[in-house]
Image (cartoon, grey):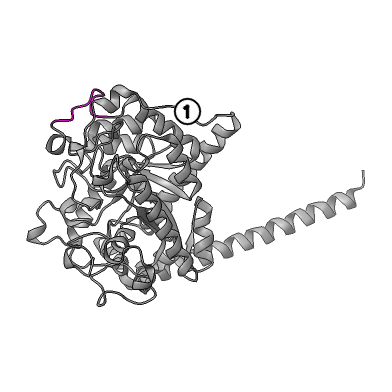
Amino acid sequence: MDFSVSSKRTKIIKVVIIIFGVLLLFVIICLALYISLRGSLPPLERAKKILAEAPLIDGHNGFPMSIRVLAENNLHRFNLSRNLSQDHYGFFGHRVDTDIPRLREGKVGAQIWSAYADCVSQHKDAVVITLEQIDVIKRMIDTYSDDLELVTESEGILKAVEKGKIGSLISIGGGHSIQYSLAVLRTFYTLGARIMDLTTLCSTPWAQYYNIESYNKSAKLDFNQGLSSFGEEVIREMNRLGMIIDVSHTSLATMKDAIQLSQAPVIFSRSAAKYICDIDINVPDDVLRLIRQKEGLIMISLFPDYIKCRPNSGTTIEDVIKQLDHLRSRATVNSIGIGSSFGDMDEHVEGLSDVSKFPLLFEALIKSGNWTDEDLEKLAGKNFLRVFRAVEDLKEELESKGTKPYQAWIKKSELKKFTNTSCSGTGLQR
């Protein structure tokens, strides 16, 4: 045996171990210094740094409907590269709360834009209006391509941020937009939509929305106020396509049906805790626990009516934090996010008047002392990315199994029992 060769190998191994140990120690020291320095920053600067490193993904913005209502989808009547707070008025005479400069100031890394058709269009021209809203979103992205980029996959969000752009996703603002056709659903997916609300402010022939008792008294359906058999096929087809299922604004039965049936996690793109604000649109604790079990996501809306129930008394950032603390306690920090509902609100939380104000919310959470940087990164967008990736992973799994498009047709009996009295007709989605 050549002991000299063996000795050399031993020395080389020792040198490698020492070098590796030194490098590891260096990394640990740098990380400790980084954490220490970030922790020593003023709360607002710390909030901005967190949002710079973990892109804020806002789950819902209804601004495309403002473009329709205020400008008949004529983008030339808006200059989104300017601050529009003093130039144009939105719904109810309130100032527009969304534009590119304020999205930048708010550290928004990705925005989900809603392609919404008013409920009065159901059974009429809902599909056409939704196509027009998809079109205006895509034209908006093309017009402001230096700042916005269309995103159709989870990694696209991170790539857009790396390029200094705001990732822009398209969401379908209600199941009435597909009428009762899986072919329309697939077409919307082909056009770039990656999320769909099952209901918004009206029931469909296949899914019930939250306010059934108020608006649907003469349209009682025979599927237990949740999903019909066709509605179950919608869930399966969305799983197959790789579309995120949004159960905001659905009835309690629909929420539970969808969460249990879907093989991928589902989201509430804009909601709040019913325990804090006891209105039907909010999410009860048992569903929050179900979201936790199924690794879904609830993104808090900043619409005052959802946060406090008594908005006339003034809804503050502290009220939002109270909601977030409750959502975290029931759904855990791994299943919460932000879905502002900016773009079509008539009132705002004090201090959170537009898309530029997100850092102020994170500053307040830091000041509360109850949220770590890791918690805030998850809240900002990491939790949404996790859900999006899970939806994509299921799509790949189903493709590998050769799953074919579903061919279901809605039953005539389901259509026959449904009337358009299920529509609230407010024109706003929130």
Disc 1 element: loop
Which residue bears the numbered disc 1? 407
Q: Is residue 426 left or right of residue 71?
A: left
Q: Is residue 346 above or below residue 256?
A: below
Residue 136 found in image quarter: bottom left
Q: Does the segment drawn in magenta span residue 220?
A: yes
Q: Is residue 41 visible?
A: no
Q: Is residue 23 above or below residue 215?
A: below
Q: Is residue 197 left or right of residue 119?
A: right
Give the residue displayed 27% in from the left and 44% down from the top. Answer: 200
Q: Does the segment drawn in magenta span residue 298?
A: no
In the displayed orientation, state which residue is furthest to the front.
Answer: 124
Q: Position of residue 2 (x, y in %)?
A: 92, 47
Give the residue displayed 17% in from the left and 42% down from the top. Answer: 275
In the displayed orientation, state which residue is furthest to the left.
Answer: 313
Q: Position of residue 411 (x, y in %)?
A: 34, 23
Number of numbered discs: 1
Residue 363 found in image quarter: bottom left
Which residues fall within the magenta stretch? 218-226
**Nearest the camera: 12 or 149?**
149
